[in-house]
Amino acid sequence: MTIIYGISVLGSIICFIMVLIQLFKAKGALHGILGLICSLYTFIWGWINAKTLNLSKLMLIWTICILVSMATGAVAAASAAAQIQQMQMQSQQEAPAAQ
């Protein structure tokens, strides 16, 4: 699961950089710096200008990468929480036996 998470995050970063380059070209340095600071701005700008700048496929890939990373991150967090809970239960059961 962590491999899928890593690939989706890497894909998301690559897509972000590619859209950011287009943002710099189309809107200039001020908007580009804003997009660098706030990736949500870059994401929204990319979808707004997807048709005019031919970014539709790239934006779709970026959106899928974000959704996959969110889903796999949630599954990994739930799995880690279950493991922690299981370890706590085991340590509680072993504690009375040690006394």
Image (spheres, rainbow, N blue to C red):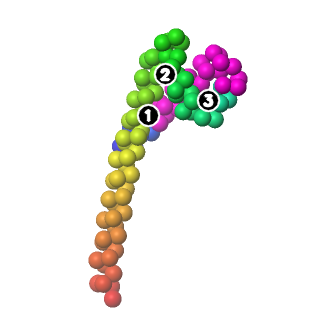
Question: The disc labelled 2 sits on which kind of residue?
Answer: Trp
Residue 76 placement, left or right of 38: left
On-image quarter of the C terminus: bottom left
The one of 92 and 52 positioned closer to us in this rendering: 52
* SS assignment for the magenta stretch, majority: helix
Three-letter amino acid code of the residue under disc 3: Gly
Q: Nearer the viewer, residue 21 or 39?
A: 39
Element type at mark 1: helix
Give the residue pinned by disc 3.
35
Q: CA distance from mark 1 to mark 2?
A: 14 Å
74 drawn magenta? no
* Residue 24 vertical placement versus 10 (above, below): above
| Residue 14 in view (yes/no) | no
Camera-side mark, 1 or 2: 2
Which quadrant would residue 86 be assigned to in this image?
A: bottom left
**What residue do we see at 53% from left, 12% from top?**
53
Above-or-below relation of 31 to 89: above
Of the residues under marks 3 and 2, which one precedes in the sequence? 3
Q: Foreground residue, 15 or 53?
A: 53
Q: Secondary structure at mark 3?
A: helix
- Dot in front, 3 or 1: 3
Start-end of magenta stretch: 9-31
Locate residue 22 relative to residue 82 in the image: left or right.
right
